[in-house]
Amino acid sequence: MTIKTSKAERVTRHVPPFGTQQFVEPRAELAVHDDGFLLTSPLTLSSPERTVVEYLRASASQWPDRVMLADRVMTDDWRKITYAEAMSQVNSVAQSLLNRGIGKGDVVAIIAPNSIEQAIIMFAALTVGAAVSPISLSYAMFPAARARLVSTYTTAAPKILFVQDANVIAEALADLDLSGAELISAAEATGATTFASLTNEPVTAAVDEAYAAIQPDWIGKLLFTSGSTGNPKAVINTHGMMASNLAMMAMVNLRDRNEHSILLDWLPWHHTFGGNVVLTEAIMVGATFYIDDGKPIPGPMMQRTIDAIKAIKPTVYNCVPAGLGMLADAMDSDPALREAMFSRLSVLRYGGAGLSDTVYQKLQRHCEAVSGQRVPTVTAYAMTEASPAAAILHWPTDSAACAGVPLPGVEMKLVQLGEGRLEIRLRGPSIFPGYLNEPALNAEVFDDEGFFKTGDVCRLLDSENPAAGIAYDGRVSEDFKLETGNWVNVGQIRTELLESFDGLFSDLVITGDRKPFVAAMGWLRSVPDGCETDNGILLPTPALREKLTQKIAAWNEINSASSRRIERLILLAEPACQEKGEVNDKQYINQRAVLKYRADIVERIYADEPLPAAVSADL
């Protein structure tokens, strides 16, 4: 991706250094392999632990009195639990599970917000060899998503179902067949075992015996895909996968275990980023983890997050690009938020999607205003099937385009698709063995060398220097052909088009499958006064229309090919709907779902009569 504005900016202004944190130099090796390349790390993976529970046990021993978790789920005040207290509760709940006959081959499902109780029962289940299956709480909260709740629960087939408050989701629970499971609720509820009753169980030698029996290839978690192409699939995460991935990241992310990290985080634990990276890595390094019950989305939840940042002043912050964009915008008019975010932040991590260079540079300018330095940013090429990171950007950079280099132990096969585009396939100890109960699908998603066919596309940032890393370039399945037969690279166009609008849009969706031309639909980051709506479409004011027209004309001037030229742009009035799967819990836009549920708007774009609301370089 060509980043025009940031290059010019670096020429005309002094660029402050990154913080004082030490980093491992990026290293990668590229070899020719059949119809492509093999990209690997020259570093040898150190011996990982059998299970991530070992990190909790070690931290509880080293920092028994340090606060491990704090939340506001059951109260407006912060509830806190130390590492020693958490370890004691984990062992008691583990004993309670053993007393119920729960162990290897059994599943403990979770439908709950991030909370102290969820963490305790999660690690207790892992301790006795049972699999944990966290299910999106949104499936229970939104009636339109209820079918996904039933599907995921049925697939998991749990013996134990933990919820934070059975009263709140009683209607959803009524749709589930609970006959084979014990319902456990953190809040008292009729027909449910109270979680607190599990935390005082006297611990016997059986807990350590069960823990000692765990093998790396045992199932540790069943994490569900987003279900963008059907019902969510259960991704098997073994104990060895999760422990290997943490060991890989520890080799390239230099973290001083004597430094007390303070995290504030909202990322849901039923997603691999929040549950497999943020939570377990925080425990591994003995961090104090404040659970943010807000979320960087428009409305009161955003203010909840802003207030929490001001109160906690984190040293490590994790987010998704959409959230970082909103926080960056909020800092423009809230210097107290900017000061709180960057006064002691040592690293900023993001994942789930690519971060626009516009937002990246704005965040760095905010950081410079506070500390005089830039904050190191870390991101990764990751997915649920890789537990989650396969490649990681672990060194300072002044661009958001790079997705990193392969982690030690990960083999990345890059199959040539043409025009510099490479399909990513993965193999290694952190890559999943398959989807649960999906033999036909599993036969399709692995090639004859055992590489997982991710369906993702990347580019080498520098073919002569593999250590420069890869850049994510979209999904093979998102690309489409125009009626002319020309292929359209959706991921690349979306990313570069977002950049060309200089932060005007929070996200875009590209259209044109079997149509005569490429068009785009998008959500403005901020809607100016005077805009009206018409059947889900935002009607731009004359000033806004002129500005957008100029932007499209500038884009088309250097992107004249039919596969890249944008003929029409539509502003969407209604936000992406989580109930319909248009956006997930991490605010990642599902292009396929948006096109499905807004098919009427798409058809109007391509109608014979030009859509009056459409913006075009020719209108």
Image (tube, helix red, strand yellow):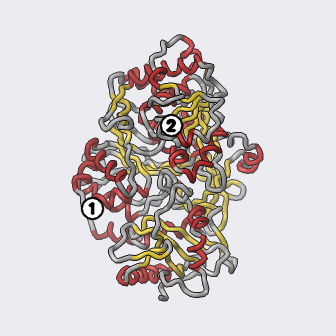
Q: Disc 2 designates what residue?
A: 246
Q: Disc 1 designates what residue?
A: 332
Dot 1 surroundings within 10 Å: few (below 14), some, or many (20 or more)? few
- Spot occupied by residue 495 in the image (x, y as percentages of width and height): 49, 66
Q: Decide which of 395, 226 is in the foreground and name it.
A: 226
Query: Gap in Å between the C-alphas at discs 2 and 1?
Result: 36 Å
Residue 603's tag is: none
Give the side of residue 1 with respect to residue 333, left or right: right
Instruction: Answer above or below: position of 117 versus 326.
Output: above
The kind of residue on which mark 2 rests is Leu
Determine contact: label 2, label 1, CB under 8 Å. no
Let me know if residue 459 appears in the view: no
Residue at 48% x, 51% y is: 586
Instruction: Answer above or below: position of 251 versus 99.
Output: below
- Spot occupied by residue 420 in the image (x, y as percentages of width and height): 60, 66
The kind of residue on which mark 1 rests is Asp
